[in-house]
Amino acid sequence: MKAQRRHELKENSLIRSLKQLPSASQQYGSRIALGIVLVAIIIVVIRSRMNAAADRVNMAQQSLNQAGSDLFQLKDRLVSQPGAELQLGAGSSGALFRWHQARR
């Protein structure tokens, strides 16, 4: 008997909460929608920052690849011109590259 009574009480509780659902959604609907929008905005901001960091890494890698390619082209030009000399040195602004013609 006790189990049947508990079952009836649970059903009554469920029915009451379902009847209150429309009024609760009217009362809290705008807050729930605002919360969903805020969560979506936070997700978009986090993803854009993660993508921006990856883009910066890719740009740096491309710049390094281009610098290496430029050095190989410079070396090839130097080899093709007899008497030319390449001096590499580190300055305050990074690597300095000077291409001098050797004096005869």
Image (spheres, helix red, strand yellow):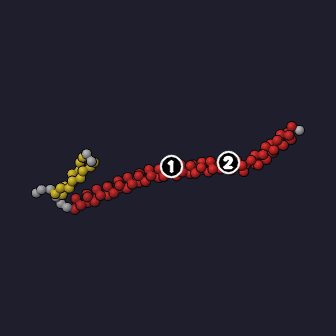
User: Could you say which is closer to the camera, residue 62 or residue 35?
Assistant: 35
Say the numbered circle drawn on residue 28. Answer: none
Counting from the top left corner in percent of width and height, residue 50 is at 48, 50
The three-letter amino acid code for the residue at tag 1 is: Ile
The three-letter amino acid code for the residue at tag 2 is: Gln
Seen at 22% across and 59% down, the residue is: 78
The answer to whether residue 19 is left or right of residue 104 is right
Q: CA distance from mark 1 to mark 2?
A: 31 Å
**Quadrant in the picture for residue 8:** top right
Counting from the top left corner in percent of width and height, residue 73 is at 28, 60
Seen at 24% across and 53% down, the residue is: 97
Quarter of the image that includes the C terminus: bottom left
Q: Which residue ends up furthest to the top in the rendered image?
A: 2
Seen at 79% across and 47% down, the residue is: 15
Counting from the top left corner in percent of width and height, residue 3 is at 85, 39
Mark closer to the chain start, 1 or 2: 2
Determine crowd level at label 1: few under 14, some 14-19, many 20+ residues with C-alpha closer than 10 A.
few
Count the numbered circles shown.
2
The answer to whether residue 45 is left or right of residue 9 is left
Q: Secondary structure at mark 1?
A: helix
User: Could you say which is closer to the camera, residue 36 or residue 64?
Assistant: 36
What residue is pinned by disc 2?
27
Seen at 41% across and 52% down, the residue is: 56
Q: Secondary structure at mark 2?
A: helix
Say the numbered circle drawn on residue 46. Answer: 1
